[in-house]
Image (tube, rainbow, N blue to C red):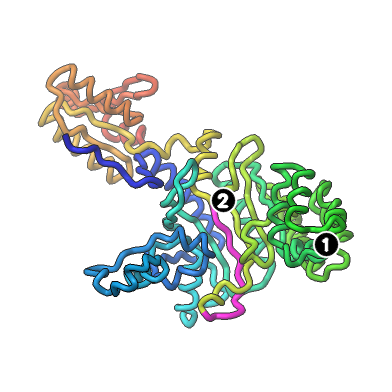
Amino acid sequence: MAQKPSIPKGTRDFNASDVAKRTYIMETIKEQFQIYGFQPIETPSFENSDTLMGKYGDEGDRLIFKILNSGEFLKKISDEDYNQKSESLITPKISEKALRYDLTVPFARYVVQHQNDIEFPFKRYQIQPVWRADRPQKGRFREFYQCDADVVGSKSLFQEVEFVQLYDAVFSALKLEGVTIKINNRKILSGIAEVIGAQDKLIDFTVALDKLDKIGEDKVKEEMRGKGISEDGITKLQPLFTLKGEFGEQIESLKSILSASEIGLKGIEELEFINTAISNLELKTAILQLDVTLARGLNYYTGAIFEVSAPHGVKMGSIGGGGRYDDLTGIFGLKDMSGVGISFGLDRIYLVLEELNLFPSTITESIKVLFINFGQDEAMFSLNAVTKLRQAQVKAELFPDAAVSGKQRKKQMNYANRRNIPFVVIMGEEELKSEMYTLKNMVSGEQQTVNFDQLLSLLK
């Protein structure tokens, strides 16, 4: 017996319902991207290895899928090199291309390569799959989609304001109300590190602070001590552990903590601008919240940091995130090109919408009406009606095989039920003679005999 086929770990098949729901999310996001003036681009599934390698740190480099060169690639390696069994020595000689790890580095490459053809500031969106050789586990896949929007070539904080509005617009359109858009600023974290005398331990300090909600104040302090942060510095941090209240109240508390830090006060100034603008413009359904423990992407974000969490009561990690970066294209030689961008977590948004039953019932409806096949003459008459319905944008289908027995007719009805087709048309001998159609509602069971114009009106 042949072995049952399988797919690689960390990948997935999607059935028709899955695809319809994922398409609904992506089309909703895409529509808002376009309303906000973002232009679509696409980049290749694979890039030259030197475009990707060295851009994500050692851990990221290990997770990049390498593509073997065509032909007899091993012949180009000397016995001496081969015998050393050194991955770093051999890989560049047998693999010149790699699958993209994210959309950000290819975007930076795109901007640098096409800089003479781009009008800056350049607003782009991209919805494409990426690949990571990660260890598969629940919610973590080796192939998944990213939905990104970025603006490069402008340092204006109005861009951050627009991204807050964009998050609000997308989740409101998805009927996912009550999401929290958390915001922080890298300059504030740098200012706090400066005040406590731990500038060289910025990453250690922020990683520990980021765990405040998970492990509590005492454990965070213990971890900071373990990282070499002084007792005096931890004492100066005390107001952060009890930072509460509205956005404006937290800002005032931060001003007193960071009064001696120029960079910290600059971060506060930027956050105040964004909060004031959003207060004046007002959000539809989302909530903007200051979170000084937010430290994602600290290695490349230089200003605002965003993270979006699901509505209260839904246990899910972040469903979006992003931030301001001042020199993304610098990795390819184009200096001082400031940008800001955000991303939507497609798979997690899907799970949240599913949990809250927020997918419209119509999106998984592949066919509106199925014509039962009673034989060749009836089928030809039915197919004529199916053709006219399709021309009127009604999704219609004729069952291909004739039902010559009651059992086979029942099979066709069951087929309609299993595919969630809401209507069937029964076109038997009597209907054929009168050129009428018996329309059955598969939910209510109600039947009515109508002419074609009435049929079209009922199905539209």
Residue at 54%, 80% (x, y): give it: 334
- The quarter of the picture where residue 403 lies is top left
Q: In the picture, which quadrant includes the N terminus?
A: top left
Mark 2 secondary-structure assignment = helix
Q: What stretch is highlighted in magenta?
A: 333-344
Residue at 28%, 40% (x, y): give it: 389
Relative side of 156 to 414, left or right: right
Q: Which residue does the numbered mark 1 point to in the structure image? A: 196
Q: Which of 74 and 236 is in front in this view?
A: 74
Which label sits on residue 59? none
Of circles 1 and 2, the one toward us is: 1
First in sequence, mark 1 or 2: give its number.
2
- The quarter of the picture where residue 114 lies is bottom left
Q: In the picture, which quadrant includes the C terminus?
A: top left
Whole-percent x, y for residue 458 in the image: 36, 32
Labels 1 and 2 touching (C-beta < 8 A): no
Relative side of 136 to 257, left or right: left
Q: In the picture shown, does residue 129 fall above or below 175?
A: below
Residue at 18%, 28% (x, y): give it: 373
Whole-percent x, y for residue 203 in the image: 68, 60
Q: Is residue 38 visible?
A: no
Q: Which amino acid does the dot numbered 2 rest on?
A: Val
Q: Which residue does the numbered mark 2 point to in the structure image? A: 170
Whole-percent x, y for residue 354 in the image: 50, 36
Q: In the picture shown, does residue 381 fall above or below 227?
A: above
Identity of the residue furthest to the left in this view: 376
Relative side of 376 to 413, left or right: left
Q: Which of 118 and 187 is in front in this view?
A: 187
